[in-house]
Amino acid sequence: MIRTAKIRRSILIVEDDSDQLGRYMEMANTAGLAAFGALTLHDAFDILKKNPVQYVLADIHLNGPGRQDTFDGVQLLNEIKESHPEVVPLAMTSDPKIDTYHKVMTAGALYLFRKPILTGDELMVHLEQAERSRRTGAAAKRRRADTALPPSLALRCADGIVLPQAVRDRARSAALNSTFLPIIIQGETGTGKEEVAKLVHRYRCEADGMVPFVAVNCANLTGETAVSALFGHRKGAFTGAEQTTSGYIGEADGGFLFLDEIQTLTIDCQQRLLRVLNDGSYNRLGDSQTLYSDFRVIVASTKDLEEQVERGTFLVDLSMRLTGINIKLKPLRERLEDVPLLIELALARVGATVPEKTLEALSERCSKYHWQGNVRQLMLVISAMVTEALGDHREISVDDLPELKTMLPPGSSSPVAPNQKLAAREPNTTPEIVQMLREALQEDRPLDAVIETIERAILKAALARHSSTRSAADALSVARSTLAAKKARYFDE
């Protein structure tokens, strides 16, 4: 909910049905907004010129109740985009066509929802989401304008996401091939599961045009509220259910439904979800009417769903129904080669630059940590470090990097680099290597075996001396990819 400020905010509602317009204005006023109403585009333009309006909520199909063959509301959205950038534009329609959605979003609407508006609370939720989109978009626009990525960085992560190419390829394949299969994204918290889901959506939109993407954090859904939020409810289904709602399932029709932390769903919701995944049918809470929604599901989890089945907290039938395309994301500590690029990206996002030596020192220091919060935590820590340094009007230094308990291994009091752990568990093989070399010089031994033994020992020592694969590769004058492949061959379990 958006909290009301001391200055009463105002909204212009454009609706050609006078009865509906009256109801919407009453909802807005009850929610604490000063509401203006317009039945025509002419009236809407006149109100915009004469009154300070924070929000505009426009019906897309004007010129007669029920008509869906005109797009007069799009003209208003274009006018707002061109002449009233301070106004938050929202749109409403009862037309479910994807073409309509694409046209509206292209015209600049920050949010589109289906008519009718049901409650004042629903209206305020939409306003909050639109405000968040505006703030996010404005911040991104400022970053693009003021802190454009350096050319070398833009080539490596043009979309601002650092992912292994194999993950990108799998996301693209998942978006364009076997489009009926569920997508399962697994990884620890902060590894970028939602970013990958949005990447799948982006690839699909590039190929077929704009489609809906509805993201739901299942961990926030509890009790009866969970069923209502997912599947909607009928008016009077429970205390406070004053109007009928469509739920996330209905909103995802024709697009993607992203269910994050799916393992936290209640058993009741799991049973209902299983039905809609089987044939697209579902019922609102408190409603016997069968509805249908055609969407593709993407689920994400920090847990192994098969283990959750064994624990009895996840339905085996739902687990089987979610069989599809699996995308597994490694924790940051297992992809330390990406740390330097992630740091560069984090610095670029806040408009900061550092000397190459400082970047190398930061990369080496950050590669020593466990990062329980993974990529998300690394980006936030770098941003906090930069903010503190700039606030004190001094140059950014590696010494400014904070050390939080969650950056360390659970239960640990000091950072230990994975490479150092590797060295610790490897026995000292120097005497054996010296003896083997002596014997190889005196008698015939398989050359490949001798070379591999020596190479393994040299790599083990180098990785123990350096906190990252990158720095070890530089010291050995080999390509980072070459060293990473040899490390995987000799040491990775």
Image (cartoon, rainbow, N blue to C red):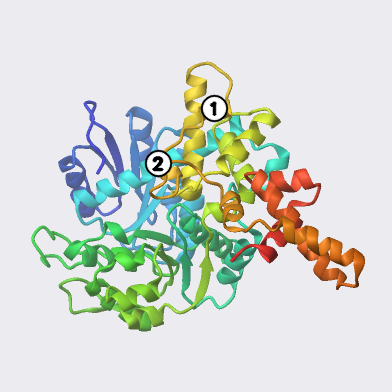
For the N terminus, give its image quadrant: top left
| Amino acid type, mark 2 | Lys
Query: As rendered, which of 484 and 149 lies closer to the eye?
Result: 484
Which residue is at the front of the view, 223 or 6?
223
Q: Where is residue 422 in the image (x, y as percent from the top left)?
A: 59, 55
Above or below 353: residue 267? below
What residue is shown at x 57% (from left), y 57% (from top)?
A: 425
Q: In this orientation, does residue 435 appear? A: yes
- Amino acid at the residue labelled 1: Asp
Give neighbour class at mark 1: few <14, some 14-19, many 20+ (Cα, 10 Å): few
Quadrant of the rendered image containing residue 3: top left
Q: Where is residue 14 in the image (x, y as percent from the top left)?
A: 32, 46
Q: In this view, does 452 lie to the left or right of 163?
A: right
Residue 474 picture location, percent across and down:
76, 44
Mark pair 2, 1: CA separation: 17 Å
SS category of the residue bearing label 1: helix
442 or 457, nearer to the observer? 442
Horizontal arrangement in the rendering, residue 40 relative to residue 464 (left or right) = left
Location of residue 6 (image quadrant): top left
Do the residues under discs 2 and 1 have CB atoms within 8 angstroms?
no
In-front residue for pair 126/352: 352
Residue annotated with mark 1: 399
Q: Residue furthest left?
A: 239
Left or right side of 299 for 271:
left
Badge 2 is on which residue?
A: 405
Q: Residue furthest top?
A: 393
